[in-house]
């Protein structure tokens, strides 16, 4: 802020001194505009010059690919190791990593794609893959040399859409509840049997932990901060998040019931207070309630267990979701493609990009680096080959995924275009309900309206 | 007589220029344009260009991934029925109408205290200015989040006297207040300007008033405020424009989602969410132009109203 030595120079209103606009000054202006335009052109030219430089690089056989993913430190380490293994085998291809947090990742990706500056290899999520693929931003990988014969059929199908195979599953995971045994032990409560527990058990056990724990520790984290737990709830009630034809698969009353139970949990102090729930939303994985020992139970994807154990500094236990009936078969879990490997449709090097995706999918060396960080390997050969190398935490995840195979419900419909907005809507109305600004019925009606317009 | 006035008399010369003068003038101009060039290029490339582009986009349906499609006034019409947009306007207006007067009040108060001829004035001035340098930054917003959390510093202090404070920034009833407080805390830059303005008020007015037996309060109302009114006006205009556009604090404090329950969903934040989160860049562009109109209207009102209360001593 300029502080003028004289106090009067403060009137921003004062127009600049008007100047008689004679033909002469106009000409002068035009001349200077010309200078400016030339300078701009020169700058543009230098920019082209820069581009030319990188083209020259590819002339001597070096190709540089950009590879974007979201995730924490642990994922960055293992992915860098996989990149190093690929570069050792392919000295002519250089992979440049670009990674960051989940939330910033999507803003950045949308901007990059709009600016025609998308990374060549993109880690994709099921919520966004339809959005990007139907709008032509992703490459049909079936047209390139990628071996998909060893992939589990379900995992392969998840990446197929109207525009071909636009994503190859990087891993398989499942929605789970993770338990922190240290919290249970301190409260003197036994970890429930996840093959027989019901939602009532969930409520009772967590309320008991809260009661027997120091202030600020709760039996369970609240659900309602994303749509995964809603998906499980709906499936257990014979509904689904989406239908096969890309519509919402539930009514306002269904989601209202889900919130009503959350409110009940909140009243019994099974879950933290509304304010604490809001604060927990923003916390990164390693500061989450489960990792810091403030929650006994919490809702996570199975592949997140190793990173969470690392953050918690102790062992965690994977549990199935509770069911209405107390039968594991009614928990209605499903195998989800944790992430996809996708490629930008505008990549200048589709062959090399496909080669890298093929490496990540089928090469044992990639598997040895990535292990189970992105979920259980969908390639059965790699899965078997890396089994002896898995750490204890990874083994737990793999065993859990194998263990629920017979209990799974049918595969859910793929999230339609616009599904990326659903999480935010769920989160917002969850806090409206928890802060008692809306009744569960009102929230259900409004949320469903918004969701419908988001995916229409 | 203002500095700009002086400038205009310098250019408004009497009589025609001689040939030499014209030549020299032309040379000067050329040099000036060359010096202006870096700024000019920046202006065209990163301000005017994108502005025109966003004006065009505001009349299109643009999802970032496919080429924009012309939809005429659709985006502007949609704004009328968008309840979240109306909420974001309410949040933003509250922020501006409460935050700016509070901030300027605090700035003026501190400036008055500092103007009393404190020893070590430069030191205090710097200390009070510091938050202004930091206030808009991500780091301070994160710090704010910690201080006002459920187990943050504020609640720890409150707990000492037996009060259980709410989660200031995680409760929809207090979240906006916490962000307004952060804004008020950055009173340093208007304070510096006030301080400079106070220094310009001739001491003789106060001396004369004292001779006539005016109290300190009377001196403030009758001398300080009128003499300072152009500066108050200047600060008001700048702060209102800046506050309408504020984004960083709300973005960081709410974790980017304007929560809880949209209670800190600033207009700019909603615009950002629409454009980059929901692939609705056409609508976001229309919102940006709507914001420009709002800011323009507020500034115009400000200037019109200023005729009735701003006193120029020239």
Image (cartoon, helix red, strand yellow):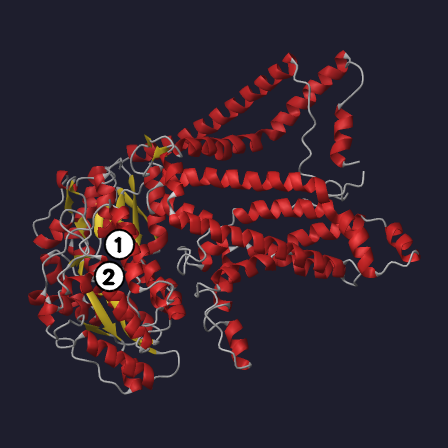
Point out the tag, 2 or 1, that comes first from the N-terminus: 2
The location of residue B211, given as percent across then percent down, is 93, 56
Classify 10 Å Cα crowding around label 1: few (below 14), some (14-19), many (20 and above): many
Is residue B36 left or right of B177 when viewed as pictured?
right
The location of residue B296, given as percent across then percent down, is 56, 38
**Relative vertical location of residue B250 with respect to residue A257 in this rendering, above or below:** above
Can residue A125 be seen here? The reply is no
Number of the label disc, if any, that sits on residue A448: 1
Question: Which quarter of the rendering shows the C terminus of chain B?
Answer: top right
Q: Residue at x 9, y 59 (%)?
A: A410
Q: Can marks 2 and 1 be said to lie on one chain?
A: yes
- Which quadrant would residue A375 be assigned to in this image? bottom left
Chain letter for mark 2: A
Q: What residue is shown with label 2?
A: A255
Can residue A257 be seen here? The reply is yes
Chain letter for mark 1: A
Q: Residue at x 27, y 77 (%)?
A: A180
The location of residue B56, given as percent across then percent down, is 41, 30
Observer-nearest residue: A75 or A94?
A75
Element at badge 2?
Answer: helix
**Tags 2 and 1 in contact by the CB under 8 Å rule?**
yes
Is residue B30 left or right of B180 when viewed as pictured?
right
Question: Which quarter of the rendering shows the N terminus of chain B?
Answer: top right
Observer-nearest residue: B272 or A182?
B272
Number of the label disc, if any, that sits on residue A125: none
Q: Residue at x 82, y 60 (%)?
A: B216
- Which quadrant would residue B257 be assigned to in this image? bottom left
**Relative vertical location of residue A108 with respect to residue A381 in this rendering, above or below:** above
């Amino acid at each position: 802020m300029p502080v003028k030595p004289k106090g009067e120079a403060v009137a921003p209103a004062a127009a600049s001194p008007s100047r008689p606009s004679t033909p002469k000054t106009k000409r002068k202006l035009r001349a200077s505009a010309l200078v400016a335009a030339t300078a701009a052109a020169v700058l543009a030219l230098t920019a082209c010059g820069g581009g030319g430089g990188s083209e020259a690089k590819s002339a001597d056989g070096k190709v540089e690919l950009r590879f974007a993913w979201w995730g924490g430190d642990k994922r960055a380490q293992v992915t860098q190791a996989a990149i190093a293994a690929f570069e050792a085998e392919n000295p002519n291809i250089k992979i440049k990593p670009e990674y960051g947090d989940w939330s910033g990742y999507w803003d950045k990706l949308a901007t990059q794609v709009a600016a025609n500056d998308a990374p060549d290899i993109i880690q994709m999520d099921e919520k966004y893959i339809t959005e990007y693929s139907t709008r032509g931003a992703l490459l049909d990988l079936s047209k390139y040399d990628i071996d998909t014969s060893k992939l589990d059929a379900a995992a392969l199908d998840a990446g197929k859409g109207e525009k071909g195979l636009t994503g190859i599953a990087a891993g398989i995971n499942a929605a789970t509840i993770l338990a922190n045994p240290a919290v249970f032990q301190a409260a003197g409560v036994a970890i429930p049997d996840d093959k027989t527990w019901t939602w009532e058990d969930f409520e009772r056990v967590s309320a008991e932990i809260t009661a027997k724990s120091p202030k600020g520790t709760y039996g369970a984290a609240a659900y309602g901060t994303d749509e995964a737990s809603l998906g499980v709830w709906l499936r257990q009630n014979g509904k689904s998040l989406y239908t096969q034809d890309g519509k919402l698969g539930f009514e306002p009353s269904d989601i209202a019931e889900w919130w009503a139970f959350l409110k009940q949990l909140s009243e019994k102090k099974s879950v933290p207070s509304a304010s604490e729930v809001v604060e927990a939303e923003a916390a990164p994985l390693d500061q989450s309630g489960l990792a810091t020992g403030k929650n006994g139970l919490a809702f996570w994807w199975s592949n997140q267990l190793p990173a969470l154990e690392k953050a918690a500094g102790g062992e965690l236990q994977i549990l199935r979701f509770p069911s209405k009936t107390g039968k594991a078969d009614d928990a209605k879990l499903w195998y989800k493609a944790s992430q996809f490997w996708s490629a930008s449709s505008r990549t200048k090097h589709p062959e090399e990009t496909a080669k890298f995706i093929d490496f990540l999918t089928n090469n044992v060396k990639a598997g040895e680096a990535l292990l189970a960080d992105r979920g259980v390997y969908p390639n059965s050969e790699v899965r078997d080959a890396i089994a002896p190398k898995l750490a204890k935490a990874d083994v737990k995840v793999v065993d859990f995924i194998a263990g629920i195979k017979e209990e799974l419900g049918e595969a859910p419909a793929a999230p339609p275009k616009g599904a990326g907005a659903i999480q935010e809507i769920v989160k917002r109305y969850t806090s409206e309900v928890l802060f008692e600004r809306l009744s569960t019925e009102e929230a259900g009606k409004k949320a469903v309206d918004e969701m419908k317009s988001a995916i229409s | 007589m203002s500095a700009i006035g002086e400038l205009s008399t310098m250019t408004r010369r009497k009589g025609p220029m001689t040939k030499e003068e014209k030549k020299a003038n032309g040379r000067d101009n050329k040099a000036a344009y060359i010096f202006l060039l870096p700024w000019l290029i920046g202006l065209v490339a990163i301000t005017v260009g994108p502005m025109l582009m966003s004006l065009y986009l505001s009349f299109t349906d643009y999802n970032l991934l496919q080429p924009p499609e012309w939809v005429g006034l659709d985006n502007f019409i949609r704004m009328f029925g968008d309840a979240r947009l109306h909420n974001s306007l309410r949040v933003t207006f509250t922020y501006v109408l409460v935050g700016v007067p509070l901030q300027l009040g605090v700035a003026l108060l501190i400036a008055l205290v500092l103007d009393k001829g404190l020893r070590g004035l430069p030191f205090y001035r710097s200390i009070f200015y510091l938050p202004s340098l930091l206030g808009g930054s991500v780091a301070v917003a994160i710090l704010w989040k910690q201080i006002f959390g459920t187990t943050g510093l504020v609640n720890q202090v409150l707990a000492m006297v037996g009060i259980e404070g709410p989660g200031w920034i995680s409760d929809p009833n207090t979240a906006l207040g916490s962000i307004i407080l952060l804004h008020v805390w950055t009173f340093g830059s208007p304070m510096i300007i006030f301080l400079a303005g106070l220094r310009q008020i001739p001491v003789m007015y106060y001396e004369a008033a004292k001779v006539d037996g005016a109290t300190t309060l009377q001196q403030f109302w009758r001398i300080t405020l009128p003499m300072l009114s152009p500066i108050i006006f200047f600060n008001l205009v700048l702060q209102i424009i800046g506050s309408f556009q504020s984004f960083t604090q709300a973005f960081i404090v709410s974790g980017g989602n304007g929560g809880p329950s949209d209670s800190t969903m600033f207009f700019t934040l909603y615009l950002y969410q629409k454009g980059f989160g929901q692939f609705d860049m056409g609508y976001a562009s229309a919102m940006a132009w709507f914001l420009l109109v709002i800011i323009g209207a507020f500034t115009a009102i400000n200037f019109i109203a200023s005729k009735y209360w701003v006193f120029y001593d020239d």
